[in-house]
Structures are given as C-alpha cells and as structure tokens.
Image (tube, rainbow, N blue to C red):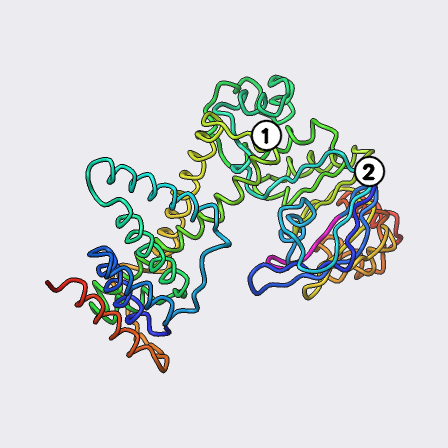
Amino acid sequence: MQDPRLTLLSTVALSLAAFASAWGALLALAWWLLATPRRLPLHRWRSALGLFILVCATAVLVSLSGGNGLSYLFRISVVLLIASWAYSERSGGELLDMGTWALGNRTGFELGLIAEMAVQSLEGLDRDLAMLRLALRLKTGGRITLRSLVPALGLLVRRELDRSRDIGDILAVRGYRAGGSLCPRFTRGRWDGAEAALAVGIALLALLP
Amino acid sequence: MRAILDDVIIRRGSFQLEASGTFSEGVHLVTGPVGSGKSTLALALEGALLPVAGRIGEEGIRSRILSLPFPEYHITGDTLAGEAASWGLLPASVLKTAGLSGRGGEDVLRCSQGELKRLVLSCILAWEWDLLILDEPYSSLDCAWKESFSRRLGERREGITIIFTHEDEILPRVDELWEIQAGRLVSLGRVPEAIRRWSRPPRYIRAALDKGIIPENITPGDVRDALCRTPG
C-alpha cells in the first residue's frame, strides 16, 4: 500500500476489528495474508519474541481470572502483526505530509513534525540499543546484569535528550517559530483503495452487533 | 597474527561494501568520508556483521575489542571509578591516564562525552589486545588528547591495530594505509610509499604532497620535519 493515509485508515480499522472479536481477528489475519507482502519481522526476532512472551503472560492472567486467554492471545497477536506491517510500510516525511493534509499548515504541520521527530527518535533508540548490546557483549562476554544496564540506559536517555535539544536549537537557528508551508503529495497504488475499503468493511463486520 | 578479508561483501540495507586484504601485525589506518562504510567494516571485522559473500578469517587472534564511536555504549559503571573497575583495572591509574584524577566518585551521567571517551579509550588501551579495532577514536577529543592518544597508539608494539577514521588534524604513526573508495576497501600499501597513493589525505599532508614532499609517516610532526628538511 503506497498511500500513507489509507495505510493509517486500514491499520486503525483492522486493529479495532482484531481487538473486538476472534472473528474480527481472523478476518484481519486474512486481510494481512491477502493484501500485504506477508513479511514477519524476523530480523527483529528478539524484540518480537519478547513482545509475544509478554502477550502470552497476559493471556495466562486473563485465563486465570476467568476470561478467554486463548482468544486474547490470538486477537492481540493479530493486532501486533498489523502494527508490524504498518511500521514496515512507513517512509520518511509521510507523517508530516499526513498531518499537514489533515489539519493544515499550522496545527497539522506542527503535529506532523512532532510525530516525524518521535519516529526518528525511536529509530535512533533502536540503533542505540543494538550498539549497547554489542558493547556489553564485548565487555562482559554477554553477562548482562541490571546493575550494568542502569548507567548504560541512563546515558542513552541523556543522549536522546541531547539529540532533542540539538534538533530544537537547529530549528530555532533556522528561524522556525510555528507551522510551515507544505504541499503534501501522495501516490496511490492500484489496489490501495480496494484494500482500505476491505479493511473498513472488516471493521464494520466485527464492530456492528 | 592476521585478520583476512577474502572477497568479502557486506550489506547494510541498500549499502554494499566490498573488501579484500590482510591486516597483519602493526597499526593500520582505514580512511574514507562519512558514510563510506568504515563503521560497517569495523563491525564486520569484530564479527557483529556477517558478510553476505566471502570470508573473514583470523590467524592467532585470541583477544579482541572494538571501540565504538560513542563512548556511552561502553559504560556499565555508575561512577568513573566504577567504570574503570568494570574493565578489571585499578581505577586510580586509569583515571590518571584519562586526565580524570580525583574524580573517581563522580557520576558518569554528569560527565561530558569527551571525558567518557578519554576514560573508555584509556581502559581499552590498558589491556593488550591481539586485535584492537577503533571506530572513530578521535571524535569528541580535543587536540591535546588527540595527540596524547596518537602517541599511545604509536607505542603499541604487538597485535593488530585497525583505526577507522575521517580525522583531518592529528593522526598517529601507522604501518599501512587503507582507503574506502566507492564502496570498496583499497589497500594503499605500507607507509611512506602509500602516502603518495592516498586520494583524500588530511589537509596537512596534502600541503606537503602539493610541494612534492613525502613525509616518513603521517603524524603532523613527521610532516613538519619533512617540510623543515626541505630547502627553500
């Protein structure tokens, strides 16, 4: 899917459908199989596994408290799958484009800019964590203790704050005050509209009584 | 003792780097502009990135370390003394070497990046590594520390030292020069012959080369000596 607006719409619709019921989740999974390149985030298997274990633990708690843990596990797994697809589809600048398109050159531009910088920070943090893991392996041979992690993570947070301050300084030096002028352009794939309509249809089926 | 790159191809996203050559005992300098693939090659030599083709081999290397560009990644101690101790070193002597004497109890979060860099590099250089890989070791250091660090690197007599940098002001004495040109690692050979083949030397070396002078090595002192020896 090339149009980020339709990607966002499909993501919201399918997430709601998957969260609402197991049938909704099954239809959302079918949509994922049909409309996406079906790429699992295997290159991030550690993060994916950690997240899955967390969901499994919550599902066990749901079961123990009298709920349907299996249904919860399935629904949340599909929500995560859709989120992973949406994240893999993103490209630089599209949040700024979408914000400006939706809410104009002042509020929309600013919200888009903030969202864009937040995603950049997440990507930076991702790189930092990978380097941190490598440095810990080199230094401790893989023995990671909470005591050694605290200063390392503290310094990463400081680095992130420094980075944010630098970006703020650069924007100020370049004369940024509020809003901006941007004419967003979006390209649309051949099947984008149909796929988004299908996603909205699935959401309606899952949410309507 | 050798690290061998045998028709290696490394990919990171859409970027691709090709490398062949042998790093033998001594000090090697690998240069190239920002984004040319120096860090990629450093990670591959450490084993953190696997090549998609070719082979990275080793002979006689029993210990290794990679110094990352940002010192924060290496820090696991909560104080400067704690950080030195986490490398298995006596804090007092390391802190002295790093110019941080009397500050052992200071919180690492309160230190500047330059101070942390000095400490991490001092900790790393306090050990004898068979393979020492330094990725942008000069970043965050002031000129005085760049000189001091270069001197200490020049004192390393054993093992393989590979320095990846785009430093333009102060460089250490090295044995071999390498350059990354258009996604390919190129061996320029041994110093001083290699200096004339250097396509992007630092300005102070370029100034000597423009006068037809080839210094004995690549430190600013070597270049100064070469310029002084030349009549006219």
Residue B64 vs residue B84: left or right? Answer: right
Residue A1 pos. (x, y %): 37, 73
Residue B73 vs residue A154: left or right? Answer: right
Residue at horizontal 49%, vertical 18%?
A: B105
Residue at horizontal 67%, vertical 56%?
A: B51
For the record, the magenta segment spans: B29-36
Is B117 in the magenta?
A: no
Quick one: SS at disc 1? helix
Which chain is indicated by disc 1?
A
Residue named by callout 2: B60
Is B30 in the magenta?
A: yes
Q: Nearer the viewer, residue B121 or B85?
A: B85
Q: Rate crowding at label 2 as few (under 14), some (14 to 19) or many (20 or more) other CA atoms within 10 Å.
A: few
Whether residue B200 can be seen here:
no
Count of residue discs: 2
Contact check, label 2 and label 1, Cβ < 8 Å = no
Residue B216 pos. (x, y %): 86, 47
Q: Nearer the viewer, residue A56 or B160?
A: A56
Q: Is residue B166 above or below residue A144?
A: below
Q: Nearer the viewer, residue B5 or B94?
A: B5
Quick one: SS at disc 2? loop
Residue at horizontal 33%, vertical 63%?
A: A29
Q: Which mark is residue A140?
A: 1
- The kind of residue tagged 2 is Gly
